[in-house]
Image: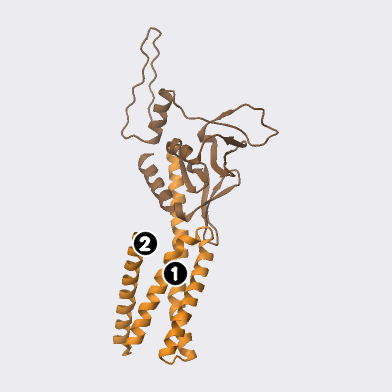
Amino acid sequence: MKKYFKNLALMIFVSYTVVSVSSAVINIILGGQTNNLNELMMFVICIIASVVLSLHGLFDSVSPLAMMVIQYLLACVLIAVMLFIVSCIDTITIQGWLDLYRSFTIPYVILAGVYYYSVFADTKKKDSIIKDLQKRAG
Amino acid sequence: MKLNLFEDKNNTNEHVDLYFSNMRPQIKQIIDIVQSERISLSGRPADDDLDDGEEILIDPKEVYYLDYVDRKLFMYTGTGVYRIMKTLAECEELLWNYGFVRVSKSNLINIFRIKQLKPDLNMKVYAYFDNGERICVNRSYKKEFDQYLQKMRRMV
């Protein structure tokens, strides 16, 4: 359990650093601006994404595709809860909700695609290793 | 591998000298034979109609995979299904040198009998065998499966 929380913390810090630095670079290039609430929301989204992804061990009995869909839906629910809490402090328009979901969905779909490809590429590699072993063993 | 055989009718001290570059599964199998410890799995036909009460010895090379169902262990070969009185963990240890690797909680597969390793559209990876059957390679065992293949690659 200790190892799990250690890995989870590491995942949160790394993902937040990447997202934060990327956002800063984009803001410099495009001249955009951010505020403290946005930064905090970014951090919370990183926590949500890391926690949801770290639960993959619970979905061993289902297919990876089903697992990704379940994780995505779970993340969407948690983000909705977060937005609901934020809306108590600040006003969030419908466009704001849609923008946030879009910002979350696009990288998720891209990463899911990368994972999908990696499964196929990795299996192909292993298949060729097996064929090679069979050939060598005669 | 080069094989030299010397027949001497007067020899009272029969022996085998084995020269090898590294201790790989093939060498271990030869040692097993010389030491009369050649592994063979004994089992009874899973089909009650075919079971005459006698155990049948089966060469591990003939086995596609082992399946643990309802607290019973079955081995699948090209000629039939046999029930064996061992645990899956025992078989895993016993058959390591023969290409058997654990791919799920209840399956041990023979990599030398795999026809193809292929993922489904839902991203589950399956090992297909000559007899048309397939076994899922569970994600939890992916790391062990990878390590096994790498070890065998270095040894064979």
The residue singled out by tag 1 in the image is: A52
Residue at horizontal 45%, vertical 59%? A121
Nearest the viewer among A108 and B24 is: A108
Nearest the viewer among A98 and A128 is: A98
Classify residue A135 as left or right of residue B55: left
* Quadrant containing the N terminus of chain B in the rendered view: top left
First in sequence: mark 1 or mark 2?
Answer: 2
Shown colour of chain A:
orange
Nearest the viewer among A34 and B26 is: A34
- The percent coordinates of residue A97 (x first, y second) are 47, 86
- The percent coordinates of residue B14 (x first, y second) are 37, 14
> Which is more foreground, mark 1 or mark 2?
2
Q: Indicate the colouring scheme.
A: by chain
Residue at horizontal 30%, vertical 75%? A17
Disc 1 residue crowd, few under 14, some 14–19, many 20+, Cα 10 Å? some
Judge whether A121 appears above or below A33 on screen. Answer: above
Chain of the residue on which disc 1 is drawn: A
Q: Marks 1 and 2, Cα distance to the nearest angstrom?
A: 13 Å
Chain of the residue on which disc 2 is drawn: A
Residue at horizontal 52%, vertical 69%? A70
Shown colour of chain B:
brown
Nearest the viewer among B8 and A62 is: A62
Classify residue A23 as left or right of residue B74: left
Quarter residue B154 falls in? top left
Disc 2 residue crowd, few under 14, some 14–19, many 20+, Cα 10 Å? few
Judge whether B108 appears above or below B140 on screen. Answer: above
Point out which mark residue A4 bears. 2
Quarter residue B28 falls in? top left
* Quadrant containing the C terminus of chain B in the rendered view: top left
